[in-house]
């Protein structure tokens, strides 16, 4: 049996892989929540200190660096995690080293291109300098995220969560210190460097001995790697365009008021969109190893993750739909933004099928059906553009929200069909669907009370949870892990 860097049997080949993935998924979502809270604190400090002009420049710099980061990933993170999950020995070390080299080169070229763009666009010198400084932090971050694939593929998800939080805590602490010292704009941009360095150092400590820390520059292997990644890179780009497409269509077709309502709703929903990826991505190494070695195990894992994603997706959709007035009030203070309540409630419904769609995407990736993913994403980008465009022209922001919910639902259904056509053994059980629908109806019942939205939200979540228990919908793996944690305590 293969062993990991400690000499112990590889966790992915043992019965402990499932419980480790469950614990890791919970830790990653919890860390994401804490990270979001830290981001809110940092934003509050920055907005109050920098003022309107400098906060605009700061946002431009961070946005351009984020764009370079997204493009420089090019699907390498997902492909790399799959490759490291199925490889061992020298092949694993070579792949890791090649990935590190590719990410560094693409990131450096991306930063250089963005600096040139900033100069040609006529941005102020402080913005151009900020892009250059932020680019250093981005390159360090790219190194850290690439090396952390070793931890992800070993299901060391607790360390991934801790390292991410350490970097964010460092950033918030330094921002607070700089605010107290009355620092200028570029100092706040430079915070990205030590924050990324902290994450990189901690990652290096955990992965040394498992993967090389020195990148390789091997053109033949790079060419093969990039050819393999290209279809998935196109699929990732299509997804990125799709996520922003609705905002663009509303801005082009509807008026400024409708754009404001949809944008408010969209910002809240996008904050929740990473959750399906964190949950399902935590199980992806198991998918990848099972796809290589044991299709029966893969079928079982897909069924369990499908059932879990179904009940969690329904809960998130219910919570957002019912709690929309609460979220709008907290974020905007209400007022003229109250009209966004209905838009957010509809858009929240799109989150449910998104959980299911994420399952199918990870299954196809584990099976190396990269071209299927590419064609699938491109097709739904085209369909979504037409459908959302038509609905925006009919009903503005609410039409765009309806279009998003419809596309995500269709995508979840068609994605399942594509997976099953690739391998009929991967068809999950649908026997729980009627019971989940009943639990959803019970969870939605509190809206009939005409109580304050926050009361309806609490009662809805409680009613849905009680229905899940009564209808025996909670997967046994989750309840077993809860019992184990209680026993340890």
Image (cartoon, rainbow, N blue to C red):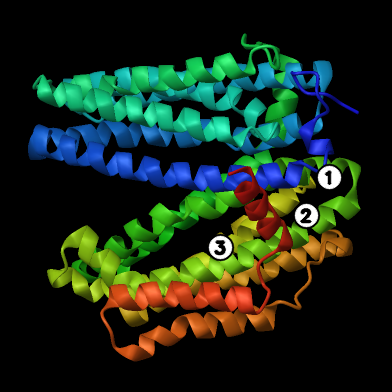
List the residue tagged with mark 3: 354
Q: Does residue 233 lie above or below 166 as drawn?
A: below
Q: Residue at x 30, y 23 (%)?
A: 131
The disc, 1 or 3, on the residue closer to the chain's N-terminal end is: 1
Q: Residue at x 46, y 41 (%)?
A: 31
SS class of the residue under badge 1? helix
Q: Does residue 71 lie above or below 183 as drawn?
A: below
List the residue tagged with mark 1: 290
Q: Quadrant of residue 452?
A: bottom left
Q: Does residue 331 lie above or below 449 as drawn?
A: above
Q: Residue at x 74, y 52 (%)?
A: 364
Q: Quadrant of residue 111?
A: top left
- Residue 183 in sight: yes
The disc label shown at residue 343, or none:
none
List the residue tagged with mark 2: 301
- Where's residue 40, x and y in %? 27, 44
- State the CA–CA distance, disc 3 to disc 2: 18 Å
Tell me the crowding category of disc 3: few under 14, some 14 to 19, or many 20 or more residues within 10 angstroms, Cα based: many
The disc, 3 or 2, on the residue closer to the chain's N-terminal end is: 2
- Where's residue 288, x and y in %? 77, 42
- State the CA–CA distance, disc 1 to disc 3: 23 Å
Whether residues under marks 2 and 1 lie with C-beta atoms below 8 angstroms apart, the answer is yes
- Residue 185 in sight: no
Whether residues under marks 3 and 2 lie with C-beta atoms below 8 angstroms apart, the answer is no
- State the CA–CA distance, disc 2 to disc 1: 9 Å
Toward the viewer: 213 or 9? 9
Q: How many marks?
A: 3
Toward the viewer: 215 or 239? 215
Tell me the crowding category of disc 2: few under 14, some 14 to 19, or many 20 or more residues within 10 angstroms, Cα based: many
């Amino acid at each position: 049996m293969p062993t990991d860097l400690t000499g112990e049997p590889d966790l992915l080949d043992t019965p402990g892989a499932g419980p480790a993935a469950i614990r890791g998924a919970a830790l990653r979502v919890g860390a994401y929540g804490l990270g979001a809270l830290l981001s809110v604190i940092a934003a509050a400090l920055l907005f109050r200190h920098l003022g309107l002009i400098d906060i605009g420049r700061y946002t431009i710099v961070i946005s351009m660096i984020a764009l370079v980061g997204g493009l420089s990933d090019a699907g390498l993170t997902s492909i790399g995690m799959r490759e490291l999950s199925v490889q061992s020995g020298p092949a694993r070390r070579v792949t890791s080293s090649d990935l590190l080299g590719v990410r560094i080169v693409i990131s450096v070229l991306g930063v250089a291109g963005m600096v040139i763009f900033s100069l040609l666009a006529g941005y102020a010198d402080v913005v151009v300098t900020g892009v250059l400084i932020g680019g250093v932090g981005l390159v360090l971050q790219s190194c850290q995220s690439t090396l952390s694939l070793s931890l992800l593929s070993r299901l060391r998800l607790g360390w991934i969560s801790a390292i991410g939080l350490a970097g964010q805590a460092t950033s918030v602490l330094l921002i607070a210190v700089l605010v107290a010292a009355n620092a200028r704009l570029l100092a706040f941009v430079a915070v990205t460097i030590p924050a990324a360095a902290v994450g990189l150092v901690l990652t290096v400590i955990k992965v040394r001995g498992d993967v090389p820390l020195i990148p390789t520059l091997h053109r033949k292997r790079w060419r093969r790697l990039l050819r393999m990644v290209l279809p998935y890179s196109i699929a990732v780009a299509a997804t990125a365009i799709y996520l922003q497409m609705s905002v663009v269509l509303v801005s082009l077709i509807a008026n400024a008021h409708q754009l404001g309502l949809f944008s408010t709703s969209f910002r809240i929903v996008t904050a929740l969109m990473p959750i399906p990826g964190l949950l399902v991505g935590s199980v992806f190494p198991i998918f990848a190893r099972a796809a290589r070695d044991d299709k029966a195990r893969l079928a079982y894992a897909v069924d369990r993750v499908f059932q879990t994603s179904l009940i969690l997706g329904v809960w998130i959709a219910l919570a957002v739909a019912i709690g929309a007035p609460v979220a709008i009030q907290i974020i905007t203070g209400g007022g003229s933004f109250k009209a966004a309540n209905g838009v957010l409630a509809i858009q929240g419904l799109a989150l449910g099928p998104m959980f299911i769609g994420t399952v199918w995407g990870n299954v196809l990736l584990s099976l190396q059906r990269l071209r299927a993913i590419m064609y699938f994403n491109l097709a739904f980008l085209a369909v979504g553009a037409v459908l959302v465009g038509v609905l925006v022209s009919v009903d503005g922001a609410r039409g765009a929200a309806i279009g998003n919910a419809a596309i995500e639902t269709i995508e979840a259904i068609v994605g399942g069909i594509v997976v099953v056509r690739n391998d009929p053994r991967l068809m999950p059980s649908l026997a729980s669907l009627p019971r989940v629908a009943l639990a959803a109806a019970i969870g939605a019942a509190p809206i009939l009370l005409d109580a304050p939205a926050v009361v309806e939200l609490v009662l809805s979540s409680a009613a849905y949870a009680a229905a899940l228990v009564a209808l025996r919908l909670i997967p046994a793996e989750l309840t077993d892990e809860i019992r184990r944690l209680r026993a340890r305590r």
